[in-house]
Image (cartoon, rainbow, N blue to C red):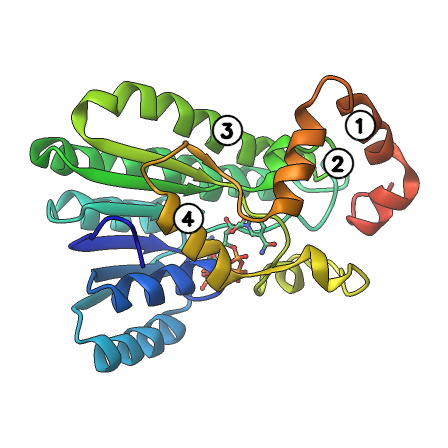
Amino acid sequence: MPRTAFKRALVTGASAGIGAEYARQLAAAGTDLVLTARRLDRLEDLAAELRARHGVKIEVVPADLSKDDGLSRVEKALAADPAIDLLVNNAGYGGRTGFLRGETADHLDMVRVHVDAAVRLTKAVLPGMIARGRGAVINVSSVAAFSPASGAQYSGTKSFLVMFSENLRTELRSKGIVVQALCPGLTHTEFHAAARQDLSRVPEMFWRTASYVVRVSLRRLGGRVVCIPGWENKAAAFLMRCPLTAGLVRAAGRSRIVRERSGKGD
Ligand SMILES: NC(=O)c1ccc[n+]([C@@H]2O[C@H](COP(=O)([O-])OP(=O)(O)OC[C@H]3O[C@@H](n4cnc5c(N)ncnc54)[C@H](OP(=O)(O)O)[C@@H]3O)[C@@H](O)[C@H]2O)c1
């Protein structure tokens, strides 16, 4: 159960994985929802299931956040709905190539989905929250935000979300609005299949379920800005940031085997 009760939440990337799980856990706690993603059929099925099970009100907004018209549609839905007291910027995906091999247009699409969408949707939701003196924004980042070996585009956009959240929290502290940068590690969702990454050889002990990740996020919301679910991910983030070990992690990241396994080989 979330530590704070929310009246109405907007969740991006709600058609699968971590976003769908936010929708499930928030609906179970009685929160009305606005769900958005590109796959309308998935959103409608989830909305029907949650309305029937929990009796909450759910609106569905199909939108591609890499396109200006899609992002504008969600932005307008937020601006027109001052009752929204929780925004979850969750939509995202992994890179399929390294920076050099990838197309510039694809790199910019990722910036739009991970960065532009989070900035514009946060800007759109804040006036209602400030007027109410209460609200929360969750930006779904990743432990890859701290990694030198998870892809220039993916890690770069995810680390933006960490510092964006940290600084936003400082600025909003006196307004009653809390901010979280959720940094999951390996989580069982459709993410790796969509990015055509085969991680089937990574032992199960390094994986978490979306249900666990979202439970930790909602329970810790209002605490530290950076929320890293799971001891193994906390340890990895520590090793990547600690001055004594960061060099070793960087060297490991440069090795061919790591680059090939993460799809970033030459
Ligand atoms: N799974 C992991 O191991 C892991 C680890 C760390 C961080 N994360 C982060 O967690 C977040 C959720 O990912 P997930 O693991 O739940 O993956 P997922 O199961 O593949 O879900 C991704 C969601 O993002 C939506 N999305 C992707 N591109 C979009 C676009 N252009 N416009 C609108 N929506 C879009 C997808 O919906 P449609 O395809 O229907 O549009 C889907 O609902 C992402 O930000 C990801 O970076 C995941």
N-term-proximal mark, 3 vs 1: 3
N-term-proximal mark, 4 vs 3: 3
Mark 4 lies on a secondary structure that is helix
Tell me the residue at 24%/48% (across/down).
4
Which quarter of the figure has residue 142? top right
Would you say the beta carbon of the disc 4 residue lies within 8 angstroms of ligand 1?
A: no
Dot label at residue 250: 1
Q: Tell me the distance, in whole angstroms, between the alpha carbons under discs 4 and 3.
A: 19 Å
The x and y percentages for residue 209 are 55, 63
Residue nearest the viewer, comparing 208 with 124: 208
N-term-proximal mark, 4 vs 1: 4
- Amino acid beneath label 3: Phe
Q: Which residue is disc 4 drawn over?
A: 217
Side of 81 where 185 appears, left or right: right
Between disc 3 and disc 1, the foreground one is: 1
The answer to whether residue 59 is above or below residue 216 is: below
Dot label at residue 160: 3
